[in-house]
Amino acid sequence: MKRAWKTSVLLMGLTAVFAAGPVWTAQAAPAAADTYGAIPADAWAVVYVRNAAEVEKKIMDVVRKFDVPPMSALMMAKGFLGFMSGVNDNGDLALVVLPTDDMNAIDQSVALLVPITDYTELTAALQLEPAEEGEGRISKMVNPNLPPIFMAPKGKFAVLAPSVANVKKILDSTTGLQTVLAAHDLERASDDDLTIWANAATVVASPLVSPFITQFEAMGTDTTFFKELQSLQLGIKIAPAGIRLGMGMAFKEGSDMGRAAAMAKTTSDTMLTGLPAENYILAYAGVTTKEAAEFGAGQLNKQIDKILNNPAIPNDKINPEKLRELLDRVAAMIKPMRGLGIEISALPGTEGEGGFVGFTKVVKVEGGAAAMVGQFKDIIAMVTGGLVLDEEVNKVLSKIQYVPAAETIGGVSVDHLVMKLSEIEDIEEEDLETVHKVIGKEGVLFRIGAVDTDHVIATFGGGPGRFDNVIGLVKGKQAPLSKNPGIVNTAKAMATQRNAEMYFAVDSLMRMLSDIGKATDEPFPVTMPQINAPVGMVSYGVGKAAGQADVFVPMELIIQVRDVWKSMTQPAPSPAPASETAPAAEPVQEPEPAMAE
């Protein structure tokens, strides 16, 4: 119980500075490197808050948008801890997790660095006593309402911990954590409002975690990612335009994952070439290099035996040799790839003619586009021709048909991948009619073709005219979707150099579901106006063996989701009282009960 209380007090201290109230001091916040310099280099993890007062102001601005009264947690926490003055409200805070070999002592292996203006002023109103004989640097807070807390000054911080040993470790450290962090990690920590960093390599190798890794390996789980991960960093930044969430991963140099990260190719040009300017729901595009593609294919080949030996794959349901051949073909398809674009769109769906769902895929290859189409045909034949040993599943797979050269569109020979829904026994006529209202009169039909030697495209929905439109965009190297105002605005809030980008339009999804509900006489309960404020994601390489991914959520979308939630949860207003002069309503005649035949 005491340990739980200690942890609670430290977490309250974290919340206090994280959610700092109004700015009481005018001192500039120390740089991230200053704070990390006070943390031992062997720390397992750090929760870092940059300029606590500024962070709370940002949080309060967001909270007010949700009609929630903002409260200053800093004022409450300072009163709880007895810190009447001396706290630098504009300073940086760090909650540190120190190494331990005892799972039951994790809550004891923490320390809190609180930014201060003057340590003497901070402790003036506290009742303190020496922590232990001969240790004059460290004091013990005496408060009957709190568990034991030991504290001492270090530079611009007051160090608080549930044990003398932890305070000593912080005070005696001469090599700071900033010597371990990559330059990119420090830069992001200085820019983000809240950062969580973990020394993954040290934690995974510790006696607390390594037995679990061994156990996972015995179960057939691939643990390469965890064993090659050097560090992990998560970050949050709040701005008037929206909220950015970031994740950075650094891998051990020379490891497979590290080499893959180092091969990342970034560009400031749009990667959405060939994707039509439609009412998109999801748009994704990425680029890769020859070296990275071949490396990825090689990694898949290395994993084939592990995949086949995985206990999760039922050998009585899947043919191992067919699965091996399938994975070999997938690896072969990866090698020539240089780029990929995918778009899921909400189509007009007039009376079920064209359907409500559109799909577009544009694959850029280094020569051999026609060969890739042939590979795809062979993969479908393999999936439908003995890969699965389950009889019931094969009944459904047998209804998949691949038709080479089914039609010619815009001078391109187009293959068809068709699922014959009408021949599946479990689908009733009424259900089939509903499906056609949603996906269109053509049913499940994918068009696939090699536009030229370097591009393969596939579409679903919209008929041959939509496929022809994509052909024109690819041949003309056009990217009309990249000029969409919502995508432009979201892209501005993320890194310019990237190797992949993605946009998700929640409002378009809601609109499509609403249209489908109307067409199928099953109204969708949620409505949202078209605001064109998509969630965005980009990824890019940083350093020699590290990568970063950022997700940006526009504030406009956050507010719109709030309004939708309020409309769903708040009771409808009561009807206005009838006028005293209004005529009385005519009585309703109840229908006569129907007579049995």
Image (spheres, rainbow, N blue to C red):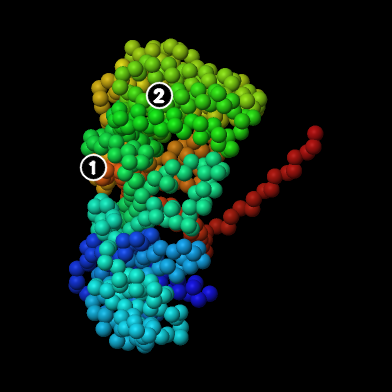
515 lies left or right of 597: left
- The quadrant in which residue 132 appears is bottom left
Say above or below: 393 vs 593.
Answer: above
331 lies left or right of 368: right
Q: Which residue is mark 2?
A: 333
Give the residue displayed 38% in from the left and 37% down from the top.
282
For residue 326, say whether it is visible.
Answer: yes
Q: Nearer the viewer, residue 294 or 73?
A: 294
Say above or below: 102 vs 550.
Answer: below
Whole-angstrom CA distance, mark 1 to mark 2, is 29 Å
Foreground disc of the pair 1, 2: 2
- Residue 155 in percent (x, y) is at 24, 73
Give the residue displayed 26% in from the left and 27% down from the top.
478
Q: Which residue is mark 1?
A: 496
Q: Mark 2: give few (<14), some (14-19) or many (20+) Cα within 10 Å.
A: some
Q: Mark 1: give few (<14), some (14-19) or many (20+) Cα within 10 Å.
A: some
- Residue 173 in percent (x, y) is at 30, 68
Q: Nearer the viewer, residue 273 or 128?
A: 128
Q: Secondary structure at mark 1?
A: loop
Q: Nearer the viewer, residue 392 or 142?
A: 142
Seen as rendered, the residue at the extreme right is 597
Q: Count of labels shown?
A: 2
- Residue 579 in percent (x, y) is at 50, 62
Residue type for callout 2: Met
Seen as rendered, the residue at the extreme front is 134
- Residue 185 in percent (x, y) is at 28, 53
The mark that comes first in sequence, 1 or 2, is 2
Q: Dividing the image into 4 quarters, which one contains the C terminus?
A: top right
For residue 523, say whether it is visible.
Answer: no
